[in-house]
Amino acid sequence: MRKVLKFGGSSLADLDKMRNVAQKVRDRALQGEELVVVVSAMGKTTNQLMAMIGEASQAPSKREVDVMLSTGEQVSIALLAMILQELGTPAISLTGFQAGILTEGLHTKTKILDIDTTAVERQLASGNVVVVAGFQGYNEAGDITTLGRGGSDTTAVALAAKLGCGCEIYTDVSGIYGVDPRLFPPARQLEEITWEEMKEMAFLGSKVMEPRSVDIAQHFGVEIYVASAHENITGTYIRKAGKSMEHRSITGLSVLEHIMMVTLRNLPMDSDQVAEVFTRLAGEEINIDMISQIPMADGTVSLSFTAPALDRAAVEALLRDLLQTLPGVSMDIETGLIKVSVVGSGMRTQSGVAARLFQILSDHKIPFRQVSTSEISISYTMAEKYKEPAVAAIASAFDL
C-alpha cells in the first residue's frame, strides 16, 4: 500500500522528536508500505529565518526570501533521511525541485501548477522511503519558490493526488475539533468531517489544515487523516460526506483574527470605479473577504470590505494612489477585528440556524459589524474583545 505522510514543524522540533518520527516511519515501512514523507522545517526555524531576513534588509527581494526560507525544509529532509538510514531503513531526501513540484505565481506565495512524479516513483520502486521537502517547489524560470504558510499540507495532498493514494497529516493535536480547545476547553474532537466543511473552516480561520490542501483533496478525492504525531490517539478523517454527517446543523466554529475593515466613502456610483479598487488589490494578491456596498442619498456609495490586517500598508498605499484620482472620496481603516464563523453542511436542509445565532448574540449582548453567508456557513465580524464570549456562547449552544 502506498501512502503520503506529512509531519509538521512541531513534530520535528528537535532530534529526539525527529527520531520518534523516524521510528514510526520505519515501523510502517517494515509493514510493506511505500511511503512518501513530506516534512516542514524544524520547530520555529521559519520564524527564525524570517527574523534574520528582517535584520538583513528592510525591503528584501522576494526571490531571495524564497531561497532562504527553503533551507529550513532542506535541513529537515536531510536529517530525517539520515536517521532513517541509521535505523536500517533505505531513505532518500528530495527537495521540491528534485520531486518535480512546478509552481506558478508570485514569490513567497506560489501555487502548485503540476507535479512530475517520475523521480518519486523511481525512488519508491528502488525500495526507498522518499522524504520530500514541503512548502517549496520551482517555477518555469528554474527559481526556488515557496507556497506560503502551511504550504507543506498542500505539498503532501498534491503528491497524494498525483500518486493516487491517501494522505495522513501528523501534527501536535490529536485531530480536528468542532472549535479550538484553547478557546473552548470542552470542545469535542470530530471523528470525521467533509472536505467541504473542512475547507470552509480553514478559509474562515481554523489553523489545523491549509485551505488549498483541502481544496485539492476534494477535487481529486484524496482522503485525509489528521492525528497526533507522538500520541497513539484516534484522529479525524476528512472525506466525502457520509449519511451520519448529514444530521448535524453545525459541525464547527472558526475564528479568524487580525483582520481590518476598509471603508471608502463618497465613492461615485460607478461599477468601473469599484472594479478598479478590487483589480488593484487583486494585483497584489491581497485576500478580500466580506464586501458590503451601501447606496447613499447623494448618489454616492459607501464601500466596505475586510482583509488581513497584515496587508494594511499595501492596501493603504494602493488605495491612496487611486484616491488621488477621485476627489472627495475618503478612506477609513479599522483594525482590532475578528471574524467568528459557524460551518455545517446541515444548514442546507435545516432551517432556523441563522435565527438561533442572531438570538444567541443578542442574548449575550455581543454586537457585530458585518455578516456574510454561504450555503454552509455564517460569519460575523466583531471587535476582538468579544472573541471569548462569542465562542463560548455559540459553542455551548450547539454542543461543539
Image: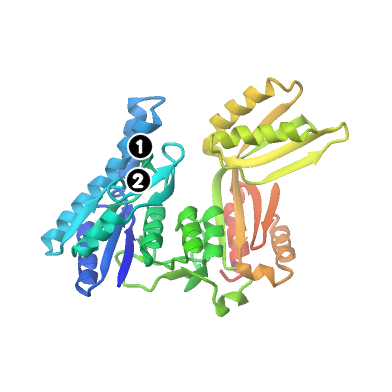
Q: Residue furthest bottom?
A: 243
Give the image quarter of residue 303. Answer: top right
Label placed on residue 66: 1
Q: Is residue 213 left or right of residue 84?
A: right
Give the image quarter of residue 196. Answer: bottom right
Residue at 15% of width from left, 54% of height from top?
82
Residue at 63% of width from left, 22% of height from top?
321
Q: Is residue 87 left or right of residue 21?
A: left
Residue 150 in view: no
Residue at 63% of width from left, 24% of height from top?
320
- Position above or below: 5 against 106: below
The quadrant the N terminus occupies is bottom left
Q: Earlier in the sequence, mark 2 or mark 1?
A: 1
Q: Are marks 2 and 1 in contact (CB under 8 Å)?
A: yes
Numbered label tally: 2
Where in the figure is residue 160, as x and y percent of width and height? 38, 62
Label placed on residue 86: none
Label placed on residue 136: 2
At label 2, the amino acid type is: Gln
At label 1, the amino acid type is: Asp
